[in-house]
Image (tube, rainbow, N blue to C red):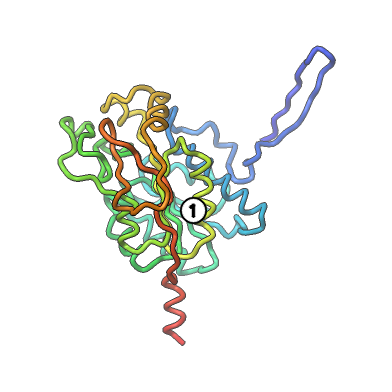
Amino acid sequence: MMIEKAQSLGKGEISSTTNHPLEKYLQMERFPHIFCPGCGIGTTVNAFITAVSELERAGLIDYKELAVVTGGGCPSKIACYLRMDACYMPLGSVIPFAAGLKTANTKLKVVVISGETDLIGIGVNHFIHAARHNLDITVICLNSFLYEGIVSRTAASSSEIASSLTTPYGESGTFLNLPYLAVSSGAVYAARWTTVHVRRLKDSIKESMLKQGFRFIEAVTPCTTVFARYNRLGTSLDVMKYLLENSIVKENIAPLMADIGFNNGMIICGKFVDRTRPPSFDLYKKSAK
């Protein structure tokens, strides 16, 4: 989208024509987007396309060989704004579809961007087995701690004290540590950042996209419309301040120790695992010879 500017500075008028630096990767005609103010989905998408832009400028990837798969709920709308091969799938089926894309065309770089409802709640069996087989995809999990856009109930990753419409007295089950789940299932890369750690999130996405195997990045982005209201976290700005003040970076610690909590604990962020293991396609090719 071309933006025409004419600005008077007192010493004459200066007009300039500029492009949005990431316009190449976005369907600008569909903006403004529908995400709520303060929602971390937009921040995560910005980190993702910035990572893609930097990798492409370095000659390391071609975005035309990139495929993005999003799941149901609020993250499903991401596919509508990307100017690249992208689609959204029903809840629980995002990883099987991504696996089909990668199987049909192994040259594709497949990236999954979806919520914890899709990946860990309804589709956790696919998540575990994709990591176990070391499927060559990058998975970015938007952890909002809520089944947002569906029934506004707590998710499998919610803290025990978290409240929602269907759990007004807190979550009865133990929350899942997502990086630990990914690594124990076989992931070669696991990291967690909040949407306040924008540069670190972007760098982690870049790093993971250059690896082979199942890569997992958790982006902590509490739902500012529902989760924040039920848990008295305040406004969108208050949520951002909370993430900044209550998160701590601990690189390369055991994923089991990467705790996460609200109101009574710190959100531990960092890159926890970065290892090498042959992806499933390489093993298949080797065994077929």
Quarter of the figure with the N terminus: top right
> SS for tag 1?
strand
Amino acid type at circle 1 is Val
Task: Give the left or right position of residue 62, taking residue 162 as reference.
Answer: right
Residue at 50 percent across and 62 percent down: it is 211
Q: Percent position (x, y) of residue 259?
A: 30, 44
In the depicted view, which residue is nearer to us: 66 or 251? Answer: 251
- Residue drawn 62% across and 49% down? 54
- Report which quarter residue 148 is drawn in: top left
| Residue under label 1 | 68
Outermost residue toward the bottom in this view: 289
> Quick check: 194 above or below 88?
above
> Can residue 120 be seen from the camera position used here?
yes
Q: Residue furthest right?
A: 12
Return the x and y of residue 235 as percentages of the image width and height: 38, 22
Q: Residue furthest top?
A: 10
Using residue 173 as the reference point, say whether residue 134 is left or right of it.
Answer: right
Quarter of the rendering containing residue 248:
top left
Image quadrant in which you'd find residue 31:
top right
Spot occupied by residue 274 in the image (x, y as percentages of width and height): 44, 59
